[in-house]
Image (cartoon, grey):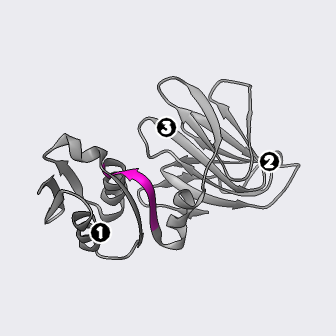
């Protein structure tokens, strides 16, 4: 298991004879060994991910969604209190909508969802608001937008996770009309 920043994994001292269950808050990438007699289960808030031996990512960071991306193998998703299971195949994203209590499964480019474990941030057509949510968790900063319209700016970017946050701000300022000011642990984003 690889845990991302601001994440928590709870697990028993030893697994039972019939299952291997863990609880996740935040984001984690799992590589699970196949054991048909003891399926691996990730309880991620309102979603239960049943695994039969695979590599996958689960994220509960977003206040609106819980996301599971499958790299290889096979997983099944269930909503809390529901017996229906959605099967997810490699290169697919299963997104649980917390408000509507629905699950959508679709094919995606998995790299933006899993490169964090390799020490990179990879954003493809991502909003500045979502990018700054990730930066706030990783760099432990608070972000303020002086102009709400800046939240919707879209970017493609790839950077090392251990780089100074000001390097990202430099890139974003050069490619947009946003200005970034870092004061201690506070980032203020305004229009140029």
| Residue to which mark 3 is pinned | 65
Q: Within the image, what quadrant is residue 132 found in?
A: bottom left
- Measured in 3D between alpha carbons, the distance from the residue under mark 2 to the one under mark 3, in whole angstroms, is 24 Å
Image coords of residue 65 (percent x, y): 49, 37
Image coords of residue 57 (percent x, y): 60, 54
Q: Within the image, what quadrant is residue 152 found in?
A: top left
Q: Give the range drawn in magenta.
A: 121-128
Left or right? Give the position of 39 relative to 135: right
**Looking at the picture, does residue 160 appear above or below residue 9?**
below
Q: Earlier in the sequence, mark 1 or mark 2?
A: 2
Callout 2: SS: loop
Q: Earlier in the sequence, mark 2 or mark 3?
A: 2
The residue drawn where x is 60% and y is 55% is 109
Callout 3: SS: strand
| Residue to which mark 2 is pinned | 39
| Residue to which mark 1 is pinned | 168
- Disc 1 vs disc 3: which is toward the camera? 1
Left or right? Give the position of 157 relative to 51: left
Left or right? Give the position of 147 relative to 101: left
């Amino acid at each position: 298991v690889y845990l991302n920043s601001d994440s928590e994994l709870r697990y028993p001292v030893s697994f039972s004879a019939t299952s291997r269950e863990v609880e996740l808050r935040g984001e984690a990438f799992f590589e699970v060994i196949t054991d048909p007699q003891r399926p691996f289960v990730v309880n991620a808030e309102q979603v239960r991910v049943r695994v039969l031996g695979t590599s996958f990512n689960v994220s509960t960071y977003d206040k609106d969604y819980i996301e599971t991306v499958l790299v290889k193998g096979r997983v099944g998703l269930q909503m809390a209190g529901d017996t229906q299971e959605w099967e997810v195949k490699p290169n697919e994203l299963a997104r649980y909508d917390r408000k509507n209590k629905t699950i959508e499964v679709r094919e995606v480019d998995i790299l933006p969802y899993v490169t964090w474990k390799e020490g990179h941030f990879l954003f493809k057509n991502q909003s500045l608001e979502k990018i700054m949510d990730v930066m706030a968790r990783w760099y432990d900063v608070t972000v303020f937008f002086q102009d709400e319209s800046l939240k919707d700016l879209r970017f493609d970017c790839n950077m090392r996770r251990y780089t100074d946050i000001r390097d990202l701000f430099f890139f974003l300022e050069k490619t947009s009309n946003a200005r970034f000011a870092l004061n201690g642990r506070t980032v203020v984003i305004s229009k140029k």
